Image (cartoon, rainbow, N blue to C red):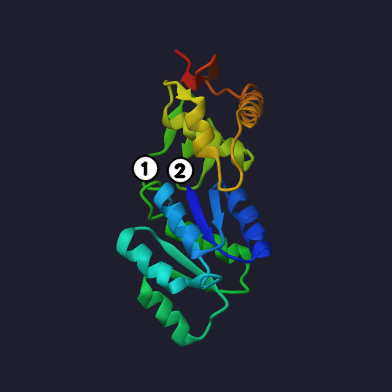
Amino acid sequence: MRLLLVEDSARLAELLGETVREAGWRLDAVTSIADAEAALALSEHDLVLLDLGLPDGNGLDLLRTIRRQHKDLPVLVITARGSIEERIEGLDAGADDYLVKPFHHREFLARCRAMLRRSPTALQPVLECGGLRFDPATAELSCDGVPVPLPPRERALVELLMRDAGRVVQKRKLELTLSEFGEEMTANALELAVSRLRKKLQPLPTRANLVTVRGVGYMLQAEA
């Protein structure tokens, strides 16, 4: 799952970023309407988290643009504008949900999960390779029914490899997909993530091998 956060408060963006990544989702964070429009044109997202008080305009204008151009993309408004009139205006402009600051991070996550459950990515079937099982709806990995806890980057990596299980996934594709705005996944960082993932999978009865295809990429392959 890839989320787009449009929020000009650096502190709140940092806190929400930690919460989102711990949930196993990737996050692109921008601070303006112009940057949000560029992000939406550049990458596909599963959910937009939208503040309304932005430095280059009213977030409601961006919301209306999203509804015209990406009609099925869910939008959660996160704002200090909490009057009933403002909530109605936001929902009528196209928001799928409306959360007033300050809010508890658990409620924020619950609302995100509820919206992401309806996304095309969440509706995809559970991924399996050998004894490994990954549920896109919950971003949870298990091995023979036992949960396998992983940090966010390794969780995203194993999902990408399982989506193409049995086929080589090019390094550049992994680097681009795992990158976030302002934090590019380098070749060295990818190698480190693969090494850590391999060490965590080795003791488990995965019945799958994480194979390095030198100079090309990586492959998760079920044992014969």
Q: Position of residue 178 (x, y in %)?
A: 54, 38
Q: Position of residue 83 (x, y in %)?
A: 51, 86
Relative to 222, 22 lies left or right? right
Figure check: 48 above or below 127: below
Q: Nearer the viewer, residue 116 or 53?
A: 53
Q: Nearer the viewer, residue 7 or 193?
A: 7
The residue that mark 1 highlights is 124
Disc 2 marks a residue whose amino acid type is Pro
Q: Position of residue 42 (x, y in %)?
A: 43, 48
> Residue 95 is drawn in which quadrant?
bottom left
Q: Which mark is residue 222?
A: none
Q: Are marks 2 and 1 in contact (CB under 8 Å)?
A: yes
Relative to 180, 127 lies left or right? left
Q: Position of residue 129 (x, y in %)?
A: 46, 26
Mark found first going from the N terminus, 2 or 1: 1
Figure check: 218 above or below 116: above
Disc 1 marks a residue whose amino acid type is Gln
The residue that mark 2 highlights is 136
Figure check: 222 above or below 106: above
